[in-house]
Amino acid sequence: MSKKALTVDDSKTMREMVTLTLKSAGFEVQEAGDGVEAIKVLNGNRVDVIITDLNMPNMNGIELIRALRADPAHKMTPILMLTTEADGSKKEEGKVAGATGWIVKPFQPEKLVAVVQKVVGG
């Protein structure tokens, strides 16, 4: 059975790049344009990993992580931040919120796949 991933980014191009990268590695991928949409997509659905941008309208990545960590269904789901932010304080904020890892854009497809497989135990 293939692993499921959710990519959350307000950039359609970035979502498509992540989706293409993960699908080529055998993942089933769902997409959301921001944190609010991500929560709707996840409602009643389980995924093996969530990859989210930091800066998004409506609900940013940190707010999304906090919301998901407060939900028992997603408390243990690995959540990776995929963002242009390389700032240490933002990384710390993400970690405190419950992010599993941090990848800086632009990402290398093989590195993204390696990190995702590592956190999902594949």
Image (cartoon, helix red, strand yellow):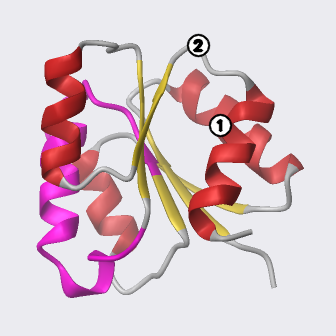
Q: Does the magenta stretch include residue 112?
A: no
Residue 113 percent coordinates (x, y):
73, 44
Q: Mark 1 points at which residue?
A: 18
Which range is magenta? 51-77
**Horizontal relation, residue 20 to residue 121: left or right:** right
> In the image, residue 56 lies at what x, y percent?
25, 29
What secondary structure is found at the residue carrying circle 1? helix
Residue drawn at point x = 43 percent, y = 63 percent: 78
Residue at figure coordinates x 77%, y 40% from the top left: 20
Q: Which amino acid is tagged 2?
A: Pro
User: Measured along the vertical axis of the image, is residue 114 above or below residue 85?
Assistant: below
The N terminus: image quadrant: bottom right
110 sits left or right of 18 in the view: right
Query: What amino acid is found at the position of numbered circle 1 in the picture?
Result: Val
Pointer 2 local density, CA inside 10 Å: few below 14, some 14–19, many at least 20: few
Q: Where is residue 80 in the image (x, y as percent from the top left)?
A: 43, 46
39 horizontally vs 121: left or right: left
Quadrant assignment, res 4: bottom right
Note whether 59 is above or below 82 in the view shown. below
Q: Residues within 10 Å of mark 1 (few under 14, many from 20)?
A: many
The one nearer the camera, 9 or 73, is: 73
Q: How many marks?
A: 2
The residue under the point 35% across, 76% down is 76
Ranked by sequence position, the earlier of labels 1 and 2 is 1
User: In the rendered image, which quarter contains the C terminus?
Assistant: bottom right
Is 83 drawn above or below residue 25 in the view shown? above
Q: Residue at x 38, y 53 (%)?
A: 100
Q: 4 above or below 109? A: below
Q: Name the residue under label 2.
A: 106
